[in-house]
Amino acid sequence: MNRCLLCNQYFIPEISFLNILSPVEKHEAKLCQHCLNKFELLGKIRCFLCSKNLNKEGICNDCQRWQTIYRNDPLKNYAIFRYNAFFHDLMVNYKRYGDYVLYQVLQELCHEKLKSMNYDAYIPIPTSPEHMEKRQFDTISAIYADLVPLTPLLQKK
Ligand SMILES: [Zn+2]
Ligand SMILES: [Zn+2]
């Protein structure tokens, strides 16, 4: 029996074959199915640059405009979930109210996808010293430091 980090209800996690067979793949589910279902996965047909869902694959109007301003690809953003009201509330509680334990919810939402991605370096966007002081933790490294090797190369201006 696990306890859901968002609704506090006890739930029985789904048992996958990977969990049974592989000692490395031990992952404790942190969210019940009811809460998980409130997060909307983005569809497969999306903008190559910003992940916005489109009717056909390509580059969305916003990104085309950015490209004319910045010439080459300004930024590639890969999103897994739509930023719906539920996601918004999660981020408000995590970032504005500094609810540290929610880093585990965000890990739960992205750890599977991260395994299938491979980059040369994972560079966290730094938190401002004022926010660090207020929350007493770094919102980005709290989520990702356990999942990928982080290379902190940037500094907040
Ligand atoms: Zn729940
Ligand atoms: Zn786009």
Image: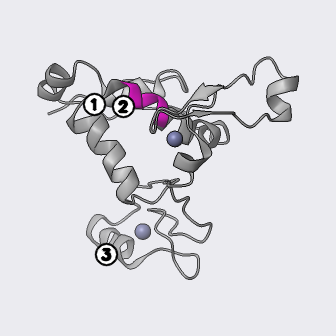
What's the residue at 58%, 40% (across, down)?
32
Q: Does the magenta stretch include residue 13?
A: no
The residue carrying mark 2 is 140
Specify few, some or many for label 1: CA neighbours under 10 Å numbering under 14, 14-19, or 20 or more: some
Residue 131: image quadrant is: top left
Mark pair 1, 3: CA separation = 27 Å
Q: In this view, does 151 lie to the left or right of 11?
A: left
**Three-letter amino acid code at the position of disc 3:** Arg
| Residue closest to the eye, 13 or 55 | 13
Callout 2: CB less than 8 Å from ligand 2 = no
Which residue lies at the image location 36% right of the left edge and 31% below the top edge?
140
The first of marks 2 and 3 along the sequence is 3
Above or below, comparing residue 90 to residue 77 in the picture: above
Q: On the image, numbered disc 1 is attached to which residue?
A: 126
Q: Is mark 3 on a helix, strand or loop?
A: helix
Extreme-front residue of the structure: 9
Could you tell me which residue is drawn at 32 percent across and 30 percent down? 139
Disc 2 to disc 3, C-alpha distance: 29 Å
Q: Quadrant of residue 56?
A: bottom right
Give the mark nearest the N terminus, 2 or 1: 1
Residue position marked by numbered label 3 in the rendering = 65
Q: Residue 87 vs residue 20: left or right?
A: left
Q: Give percent across and percent down for residue 108.
A: 55, 35
Q: Mark 2 against mark 3, which lies toward the viewer?
A: 2
Disc 1 secondary structure class: loop
| Magenta extent | 101-105
Tell me the crowding category of disc 3: few under 14, some 14 to 19, or many 20 or more residues within 10 angstroms, Cα based. few
| Circle 2 crowding by C-alpha within 10 Å: few under 14, some 14–19, many from 20 | some
